[in-house]
Amino acid sequence: MAPIAGFVGGWYSGANPVSAAETLVNWFPSAVETPGGAVTAELLPTPGVRTFATATTAGARGMWAGDGRCFAVFADALVELDAAGVVTPRGTVAIDGRPVTFSTNGDAGNQLLITSGGSAYCYDLITNALSVVLSGGVVQGGVADGYGVVLFDSGVVRVSALFDLTSWDPTQFLQRSIQSDLWQALLVDPYGYLNLIGSKTGESWSNVGGAVLPFAPDRSGLLEEGIAATHSLAQAGKHKVWLSMNANGGYGVMAAQGFQARRISHHALERTIGGYSVVSDAFGQTYEQDGHAFYLLTFPTARATWVYDFTTQQWHQRGTMQGGTFGPWRPAFHAFAFGKHLAADLESAIVYELRDDVYTDVEGLPIVRERQFYAGGSENRAVWFHRLEVLAQAGVGLTTGAASDTNPTLALAVSDDYGRTFGTERQAALGQVGEYGRRCEWWGLGMARGRVYRLRASAAVPVRLSAAFQDVEVAA
C-alpha cells in the first residue's frame, strides 16, 4: 500500500483539470503537532450547529457581542439576545440587503454605533433607546479612541464628539487627498487605526491629537491594493483581510498585518472569483476556534463561501447543501457571546451555536462533506487500481437513530477523466459504535490514466480523515 501524496490538503482546482482537481468542502486541514504522530496533518470536520435563539424576522445581516451583551439584525429588526437565548426587540433599522456594522465607544460612552441601509444609528446601552444620528449614503461605521467615524458613499468620513455618538459636528470630517480614488470601505482595527480603502489604493489614519481634527493620515500606511467588495473588509486576529481588485482588474484576497499587505489567495480561487457575475456583494466574517483563525468570504449572488485558515494558510469551502447543490454557508454572521460561538442564519430567523460535537447543519440538514483528490499515476501510463483505503476515525456510529448514523459510511465516486465526470458512488463502512478496528476500503477499482477520487460523507457523526493509501499496478 502506497500513501497518496496530497490527500490532506486544501482546495485547489486548476484551469486545466489534468493539473489539479482538488476540492475540500466542510472539512479543513489541521496539523498534528507531535513528532510521534502517525501522520503530520489530518482533515477535521467543520462545526455543526444547534439552535440557540429564534427571532421573528428572517434573514440575518449582522451580529455583535461585547461586555456581556449580544445583538443581531435580521432584515430590519434589531434584537438583543441574552444568555438563555431569549430574544428582545430593540427597534428597527433601514434595510438595503447589505450587512450592518456594529461598534461601541465602551464604558465611557455606553453606546453602540450601528450602520444599516444608508443610515447610522446610536443605541444607548443604558436606556436601550435607538435613534438615527446620520442618514443619506452611510456605508460603514466604527469607533476609534472614543470617536465615532462613519464613511459615506461620497468618500467622506464624519467624526463624532468624543464618547458621544449622538453629536456630529458637520465641520468634523475626513476626506482623501493622497490618492484620487474615493474611499469605499472603513475598518477600525484593534490598534485604533482607521483603515480606509478605495477602488485602487488604501491608507491608514490615526489619532494624532490634532487641534482641529483628531485624525491624520499615516504616510507609512499606504496600500497599493484597492477593494472589490466593501463588506469583505474584516479583522482576523492581527490581520486586516479584504477582497481586492487591482488597477488591471485582477481579483485577489489580501491580508495586512500593520502596513504590509500580502496576497493570501491563489490562482485557482482568483480565477473562480473572476468568473462570478457579481462580486461586489461579498462580505467577510472571522472567528477563531481550536487554534485556527478563519476568514470566511461569502458571495450571496454566486452562492458560495470560501474560507482561509491563517493557521495552515490553506483554503477550503463551506456550504449548506440544499436541492443537491452546495450554497453559501448559512450560519454566516458570527459573534462570541456567553462563552459560545454564535452565528446568525442568512435565510432564517435563527441564531445557532457552532459546536464541534454537533454534526448537523441549519434546520437539521445533513452536513455534506467532500474531498476530491488526484490518485496519481505513472507518467500518464494506464494503471490498475486494486484497492483504496482511507485512514479514518472508525467506530463512530451512534447507538440510536437513523441507519445512516448508527452504521455510517464514506461514499467513493471515481472519475477516469480528471474529475470531469464521476461514476456511481460506492459505500464503505466507518464502523458501528465500538468497531475501532474497522478499515474503510474499496476493492477492484479498475484501470485508468486520469484517475480522480471523490469522497463524501453526510452522516451525523464525527468524520475525521488522516490519510489515503492504494494498491496499484502499472498496466502492461
Image: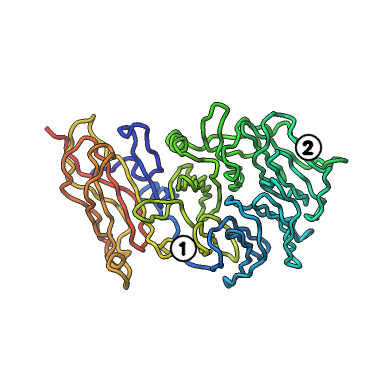
- Across and down, in percent, residue 447 comes to 16, 39
Specify the quadrant that holds the N terminus: top left
Asked if residue 189 can be seen in this view, the reply is no
As shown in the figure, which amino acid type bears the numbered disc 1?
A: Val
Marks 2 and 1: CB-CB under 8 Å? no
Examine the image and state in which quarter residue 174 appears.
top right
Q: CA distance from mark 2 to mark 1?
A: 44 Å
Q: Nearer the viewer, residue 237 or 426?
A: 426
> Image check: 173 left or right of 448?
right
As shown in the figure, which amino acid type bears the numbered disc 2?
A: Ala
- Across and down, in percent, residue 276 comes to 46, 39
Vertical comparison of 263 with 56: above or below: above
> Image check: 24 left or right of 202?
left
Examine the image and state in which quarter residue 437 appears.
bottom left
> Image check: 171 left or right of 348?
right
Q: Residue furthest right?
A: 211
What element does badge 2 sit on? strand
> Which residue is located at x 22 percent, y 46 percent?
423
- Across and down, in percent, residue 472 comes to 19, 41
> Image check: 268 left or right of 76?
left
Examine the image and state in which quarter residue 86 appears.
bottom right
Q: Which mark is residue 258?
A: none
> Which residue is located at x 61 percent, y 67 percent?
81
> Which residue is located at x 32 percent, y 73 percent?
400
- Across and down, in percent, residue 206 comes to 75, 41
Q: Nearer the viewer, residue 211 or 72?
A: 72
Q: Nearer the viewer, residue 93 or 41?
A: 93
Of labels 2 and 1, earlier in sequence is 1
Q: Which residue was labeled with disc 1?
A: 49
